[in-house]
Amino acid sequence: MDGFLNLAWFVPVPPFLAFLAIILFLNPNKVVSSLTAITGAVLSLLIAWPIAFNVFMTPNFGEHPVFGALYTIPTGKSNFIIGYQVDPANALMLFMASFLILMIFIYSNGYMTFPGHLDAKMYPRAADENMDPRYSRFMAYISLFATGMFGLIVSNSLITFFVFWEVMGLCSYLLIGFWYEKKSAQAASIKAFMTTRVGDAIMLIGMLLLYVYSVPSTLEFREILSSGNLEHLATTVVHIPLLGLDLPIATLTAFLIFFGTVGKSAQFPLHVWLPDAMEGPTPVSAMIHAATMVSAGVFLLVRMFPLYFVAGEVSPGLMTFVGYTGAFTALFASTIALAQWDIKRVLAYSTISQLGYMVAAIGVGAYVPALFHLITHAFFKALLFLGSGSVIHGVEHGFHHAHAHGDGHGSHHAEIEERIDGNLDLHDPQDMRNMGGLLSRMPLTGWTFIIGGMALSGFPLITAGFWSKDEILAYSWGLGRPGIFWMLAIAAFLTAFYTMRQIGLTFLGSPRSEGAEHAPESVWQMTVPLMLIAPFAIGLGWFGIPASFPLIGGLVPNFIENLQEPYLEYLQLHVAHPEASFLPLLVGLVVALGGLTVGWLVYGKGIGEHQVDPVRKWLGPVWVLFHNKYYVDELYQATIIPFSLALARFLALFDDKWVLDPIVDFVGRLGVWLAGVLAAVDRLVVDGVVNGVGNVSDRFGGLLRRTQNGNIQVYLLALVIFITIWLLLETLPLILTLV
């Protein structure tokens, strides 16, 4: 099995081949395209899981991670190796990503069906085929998305990591705007692409500095994260004139690279793209929020943790900045989720909040809890997003059923009711005000969604979310970061509350629309993945029970910690462990159970068809602030975007009238003048010499032609002249000597 680890580089290959096959050959056949994409995901799983379980079952594997080389590219200072790496951290990622990607692919096979996604009048054939008209393209895009994530996970260097990172950025653009007929989808895809590019550009600057100052100059993880190179980076100081600061290179590069995570994992202030990403199909939302893109942002911090650890020792403010960025984002996003109606937007802000937890964990030095929560969150958030897609599908079909049988009250967008709590499209299948009572209509979807919601809320002891979230709280308190601890604790309470609110509005009470009243359970391609993911949302947490936990601690080995500790020793990192304390445990129990209890008391029976949301009444104008996302988008629209446009216009003016164009025009005129001078030289000098030689030759030839007239006397005269000239030339030296 050890040799099997050397196939890690092959994990991204099957979905990439599926992408090529669909794009080049299989696009007309939607069924074959779908099966090809699923086959690629299956093959990746069949390679990834044996690799992951080999790592899991090998004692102290982290002491001897596997590094493999595929190509060697000579550079100016060293050889750059393109290859792969297998260690305990990316083994967990392979285990998670390969399984969830396969589940999402199977789910997509059932989700991307008609009706509902597109206007039937615009795409009449779609209704006949019972599939999205661009179904094959969708399967190709998500195959490329999977390729990007798998390639990123097994990369052995930051440069190949960044290449696959950008592949996912491209795929997010293509998939968020997949239904590009909608203006909102077009805008969301551009917003996601441009916002994440901001973080990526700053990250790239940090990578270049890391390459320049590392010894040797490389971006291979094994080299740049070695203890010797990290010590060199920590002791090499550069002056930043703009800020008037002297910073260690380790601190500067860690700070710049962090913005890659801020963009990709939607941390404040670059969080604005992720909620709008809901414009894409729900399987895309699940991939972005669970299995691929945002997970990649946190995995970057996990992969580069040795750099942050060393930078935190020489510049403690850096880790404080990282920690409070995550904690603030967690609290900030959880308040917004309280006041959203779209079932997917609630989950989107929940994702931003949970990613904040992971970033805060890195900031306090909790490497293992951050990775643990990254894995558990991926499973229960995939469960929730796929569950929300199943709900949307069911309500959508319910509206179509009601309309087909004359039970509806108009077309999909015909009726808009003005309520005290905002505009309501009576036929919007994503608005939770149009749901209610779905647990009886969609039991498989409902119960699996509730399992995911309990895991997200951190329901004690049973769910995976409790164990991973509790560890982050314990580290935050035990390592002396009370500010971060209390911010995360409040965010946890709000998370439990809005999760119960979402469950109550969606599944409990009575149906509040024809769509909810007639919603059918989803097809097996959608429900089977939900049932397969649900056990992980519960049982995965039992593999990370800390030994210090009361009563049951130590009864079950802490698999996650035991797996990662040897790797931390290999990296020569001595990460602090918090002392056992009942306060974070007690707070974790109170916020989880308290939030769920308050949510149940308010929303346990749903709400009436014309009832105003109780939280809307209680919070008043504060609810409006939450609902409008603190007006951050409006602030950017009023400041950053006009500034960017004004700067672009200024640079265009700078280009056209002041500097660049005048220089170009001068160079052009100078070229024309030089061409005229050279033409004159050619005409007067070069052509003059050539023409002069030609004229002399012509005149001399004319003289010789006169001797060729057939007259013997002329020939004799020419011979006499020639002999005379020859004799003169021969005797001239003798004559000159005598003289």
Image (spheres, rainbow, N blue to C red):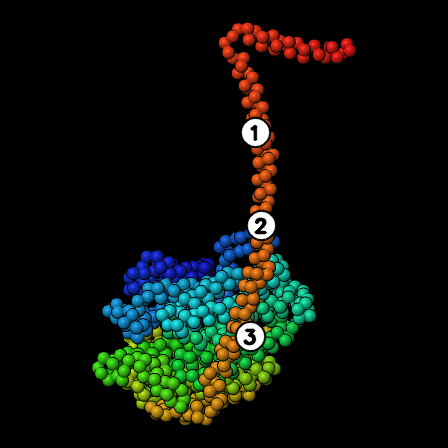
Q: Residue at x 39, y 81 (%)?
A: 343
Foreground disc of the pair 2, 3:
2
For mark 3, give the secondary structure.
Answer: helix
Say which residue label 2 marks: 669
Say which residue label 3 marks: 362
For residue 467, the mark is: none
**How many neighbours does mark 3 have within 10 angstroms: few (below 14), some (14-19), or many (20 or more)?**
many
Q: Residue at x 59, y 33 (%)?
A: 686
**Where's the N terminus, which quadrant?**
bottom left
Q: Amino acid at mark 2?
A: Arg
**Sooner in the amino-acid sequence: mark 1 or mark 3:** 3
**Where's the C terminus, which quadrant?**
top right
List x then y, in percent, for residue 251.
63, 69
Q: Nearer the viewer, residue 137 or 147?
A: 137
Residue 670 shows in this picture:
yes
**Sooner in the amino-acid sequence: mark 2 or mark 3:** 3
List x then y, in percent, for residue 577.
58, 78
List x then y, in percent, for residue 358.
51, 76
Residue 203 shows in this picture:
no
Question: Decide: marks 2, 3 in contact (CB < 8 A)?
Answer: no
* C-alpha span from label 1 to label 3: 83 Å
* C-alpha span from label 1 to label 2: 31 Å
**How many neighbours does mark 2 have within 10 angstroms: few (below 14), some (14-19), or many (20 or more)?**
few
Is 36 placed left or right of 336 in the picture? left
For residue 691, the mark is: 1
Q: Amino acid at mark 3?
A: Ile
Q: Residue at x 43, y 72 (%)?
A: 188
